[in-house]
Amino acid sequence: MMKTVIIIPSRMAATRLKGKPLLEINNLPLICHVVNKAKISGIGDVFVATEDKEIFDVVNENDGNAILTGAHKTGTDRIFEAFKKLKLSNIDFILNLQGDEPMIDPQDLINLNKLMIKNNSEVGTLAAEIKEDKIYTNQNIVKVVTQNKLEKNNFPKAVNFSRKNLYKQTSNIYHHIGVYCYKISVLEKFVNLVQTKNEIDNKLEQLRLMDNNIDINVSIAKSNPIGVDTKEDYLELKKKLEYKS
């Protein structure tokens, strides 16, 4: 039976909203909400990888598991260092869950993991249907173009990822959700590849994979979770979750 571990990269020095992992909703830090969603999925063990002692402490104080890493430019480098430090055995896949996605649906993580195992894929990610035209033109939102229409049980390859306006330029365009599942050998290869011009110009790390002929398969997500990048995002999410409670 193939096994997956979930590793959540997190750091205090987020560019647009500093200290966001420790911002509280219902008296629980944001990063701990993400850990709890990962646990609910039941996919495998869950760890937070961080260079910050504050995050390390708060995760462990709230029944999570955290590991300290060095400073890294990308979350991908951080999760690979954490994986090596953890010295886990018999792990086939690493699921990289962003630390600012407290609304992620655990069922979407489960479906992605199942498709990775079923297809023995190299890399998998999530995407949701675009329901508002303004998303096509928003350069802060990453879009993914797939070979085929996304459906419940299919796992087509990504053709392109872009921040640019793709409205009516092509078909099978979806709102990309930054969750990745990597085969261990592919992740090791990935972190040792040199950044490509395409990746640098578009500020999209996943393009390095595609530029090196590594396939990325895409699973449809039932919902498009609210990521927390700005103070406005945080206040909107806080209002929603505290209202629910």
Image (tube, grey):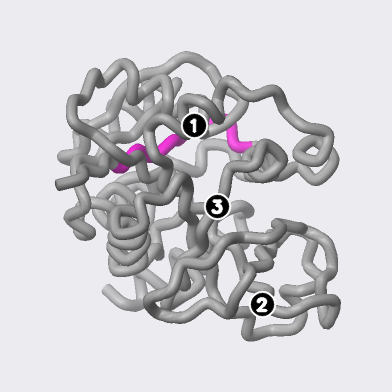
Q: Say which quadrant the C terminus sits in.
A: bottom left
* Start-end of magenta stretch: 6-14
Q: In the rendered image, is residue 26 in sight?
A: no
Look at the numbered discs 2 and 3 and tell me whether their residues touch, using CB distance below 8 Å: no
Residue at figure coordinates x 28%, y 52% from the top left: 38
In the depicted structure, whether residue 82 falls above or below residue 220: above
* 73 left or right of 113 in image: right
Q: Residues within 10 Å of mark 1 (few under 14, many from 20)?
A: many
Q: Which mark is residue 172?
A: 2
Q: What percent of the width, then of the height, locates residue 76?
A: 51, 33
**Disc 2 residue type (three-letter):** Asn
Q: Residues within 10 Å of mark 2 (few under 14, many from 20)?
A: some
Q: CA distance from mark 2 to mark 1?
A: 34 Å
User: What kind of element bears circle 2?
Assistant: loop
Look at the numbered discs 1 and 3 and tell me whether their residues touch, using CB distance below 8 Å: no
10 inside magenta stretch? yes
Q: Quadrant of residue 95?
A: top left
Residue at figure coordinates x 38%, y 26% from the top left: 54
In the depicted structure, whether residue 64 falls above or below residue 97: above
**Disc 1 residue type (three-letter):** Arg
Residue at figure coordinates x 23%, y 18% from the top left: 87
222 inside magenta stretch? no
* 163 left or right of 5 in image: right
Q: Which mark is residue 216?
A: 3
Q: Which mark is residue 11?
A: 1
